[in-house]
């Protein structure tokens, strides 16, 4: 891929992502969908490049692999959700996250964050990581 194609691709899909993994009781599925719509609106408002949310739908694995449901200790009445937040680069990520955290609806103790934590499996928390694109 040429350097100009890489630059164009990174403008569209970014070179930095944050990954979040959490579990929720299946009964909270519809409420979490609605809440994620609110988070996505805030995300776009503050300049996020792209955010995508996925639900684990298959627990089959390839030989030698461990299913993520086992890794995060999900029970049969729980769903595993993954959220990818894309940024142009690390600087863009820091700017967007700072703006989000300064938004009144996202501050610690806010109703939106409280709703999220009330929907997540109690005491399970969130798994998170920040990743940079590798040019392979």
Image (spheres, helix red, strand yellow):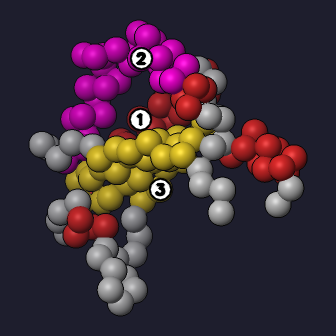
Of residues 93 and 38, which is closer to you in this image?
93
The answer to which image quadrant residue 81 occupies is bottom left
Q: Main secondary structure of the magenta part?
A: helix
- The C terminus sits in image quarter: bottom right
Residue 123 in picture, x, y percent from top left: 12, 43
Residue 104 shows in the view: yes
Residue 74 in picture, x, y percent from top left: 20, 63
The magenta-colored residue range is 94-121
- The N terminus sits in image quarter: bottom right
Residue 2 in picture, x, y percent from top left: 86, 55
Q: Is residue 132 magenta?
A: no
* Mark nearer the N terminus (2 vs 1): 1
Nearer the camera: disc 2 or disc 1: 2
Q: With respect to residue 4, does 107 lie above or below?
A: above
The answer to which image quadrant residue 77 occupies is bottom left
| Horizontal relation, residue 132 to residue 77: left or right | right
**x 27%, y 43%: residue:** 126
* Residue located beneath label 1 in the image: 35
Label 3: few (<14), some or many (≥20) within 10 Å? Answer: few
**x 38%, y 45%: residue:** 129
* Residue located beneath label 3 in the image: 54
- Marks 2 and 3 sit apart, C-alpha to C-alpha, by 23 Å
- Classify mark 1: helix, strand or loop: helix
* Mark nearer the N terminus (3 vs 1): 1
Residue 31 in picture, x, y percent from top left: 36, 42
| Horizontal relation, residue 90 to residue 18: left or right | right
Nearer the camera: disc 3 or disc 1: 3
- Classify mark 2: helix, strand or loop: helix
**Direction bottom: furthest residue:** 63
- Marks 3 and 1 sit apart, C-alpha to C-alpha, by 14 Å
* Mark nearer the N terminus (2 vs 3): 3
* Residue located beneath label 2 in the image: 101
């Amino acid at each position: 891929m040429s350097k100009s194609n890489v630059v164009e691709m990174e403008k569209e899909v970014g070179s930095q992502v944050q990954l979040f993994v959490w579990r929720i009781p299946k009964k909270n599925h519809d409420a979490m969908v609605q809440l994620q719509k609110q988070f996505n609106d805030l995300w776009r408002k503050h300049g996020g490049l792209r955010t995508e949310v996925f639900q684990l739908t298959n627990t089959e694995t390839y030989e030698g692999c461990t299913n993520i449901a086992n890794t995060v200790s999900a029970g049969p009445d729980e769903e595993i959700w993954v959220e990818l937040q894309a940024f142009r680069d690390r600087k863009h990520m820091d700017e967007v996250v700072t703006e989000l955290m300064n938004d009144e609806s996202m501050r610690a103790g806010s109703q939106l964050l409280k709703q999220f934590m009330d929907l997540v499996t109690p005491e399970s928390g969130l798994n998170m990581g920040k990743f940079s694109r590798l040019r392979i």
